[in-house]
């Protein structure tokens, strides 16, 4: 009767677990989710790096344009072009102070006063040319492009670093310092817990974990 019992036990051991197929399915699903998650993270890095390069190039161009000649004149508003996000964009005629340059149908980067006029500068030889963009700038917005581009670039790089740290791809200095402090505190707590051999011996006596023979040896 023992032989059939062994055959039955071997047969039962070969029967797959009813949860094995489900476990394999869940493992495949988890791998697929992890793959797509990683793909999205890499796509974020690629797109973010591309945007950072674009803003860096615009920043360099904006800084170089600060040294380009700027011609000052007076802008007189003749129309207001509606914006898609609301409001309108001043359109008018700009005349240089010496009267040699007249720009009609030019846009104003800024606002006019109550009389519909504004002091505005014009940079036709800049890399980001006002001639190509058909625009003049009020004093408040003169050179503001470089500052705004720099702020956007800093935000873009900072956000990428923040996401990379949250995903575990990099370790920021502040987190690295906090981790070292936590490890040091844990190590110090461990040393304080262990203490000296004499302190451990006294603690063991208080807890009653030593036999009477060990206590006699310790007293000697």
Image (tube, helix red, strand yellow):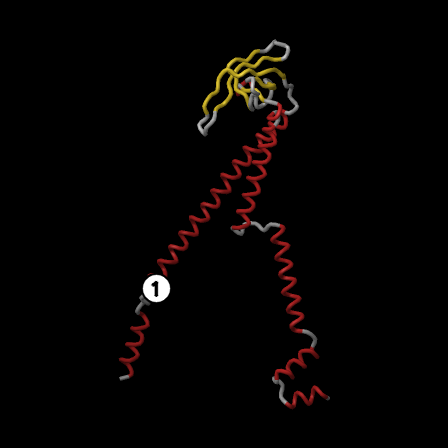
Residue to which mark 1 is pinned = 20
Please state the horizontal and vertical placement of residue 115, each as a whole percent of the image: 56, 17
Q: Residue at x 60, y 50 (%)?
A: 172
What is the number of callouts on the image? Answer: 1
Q: Is residue 165 left or right of residue 215?
A: left
Please state the horizontal and vertical placement of residue 28, each as a whole percent of the image: 38, 55
Location of the N terminus (image quadrant): bottom left
Q: Is residue 176 left or right of residue 8?
A: right
Location of the C terminus (image quadrant): bottom right
The answer to which quarter of the image holds residue 62 is top right
- Depth check: 14 or 172 in front? 172
Does residue 156 lie above or below 20 as drawn?
above
Q: Is residue 198 left or right of residue 170?
A: right
- Depth check: 127 or 154 in front? 154
The answer to which quarter of the image holds residue 124 is top right
- Depth check: 117 or 100 in front? 117
Q: Residue at x 63, y 65 (%)?
A: 186
Does residue 190 lie above or below 138 as drawn?
below
Q: Residue at x 58, y 28 (%)?
A: 145
Q: Secondary structure at mark 1?
A: helix
Work out which residue is located at the far right of the displayed protein and give it. Answer: 220
Q: Residue at x 57, y 42 (%)?
A: 158
Mark 1 Cα-neighbour bin, 10 Å: few <14, some 14–19, many ≥20:
few
């Amino acid at each position: 009767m023992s032989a059939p019992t062994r055959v039955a036990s071997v047969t039962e051991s070969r029967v797959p677990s009813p949860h094995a197929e489900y476990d394999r399915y869940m493992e495949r699903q988890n791998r697929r989710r992890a793959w797509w998650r990683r793909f999205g993270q890499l796509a974020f890095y690629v797109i973010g790096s591309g945007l950072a390069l674009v803003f860096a190039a615009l920043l360099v161009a904006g800084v170089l344009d600060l040294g380009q000649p700027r011609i000052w004149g007076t802008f007189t508003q003749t129309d207001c072009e509606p914006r898609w996000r609301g409001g309108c964009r001043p359109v008018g005629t700009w005349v240089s102070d010496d009267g040699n340059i007249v720009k009609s149908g030019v846009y104003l980067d800024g606002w006019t006063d109550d009389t519909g006029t504004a002091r505005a500068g014009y940079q036709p030889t800049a890399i980001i040319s006002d001639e190509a963009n058909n625009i003049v700038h009020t004093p408040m917005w003169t050179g503001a492009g470089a500052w705004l581009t720099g702020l956007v670039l800093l935000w873009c790089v900072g956000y990428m670093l923040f996401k990379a740290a949250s995903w575990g791809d990099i370790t920021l200095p502040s987190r690295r310092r906090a981790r070292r402090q936590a490890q040091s505190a844990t190590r110090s707590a461990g040393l304080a817990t262990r203490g000296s051999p004499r302190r451990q011996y006294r603690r063991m006596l208080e807890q009653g974990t030593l036999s009477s023979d060990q206590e006699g040896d310790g007293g000697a």
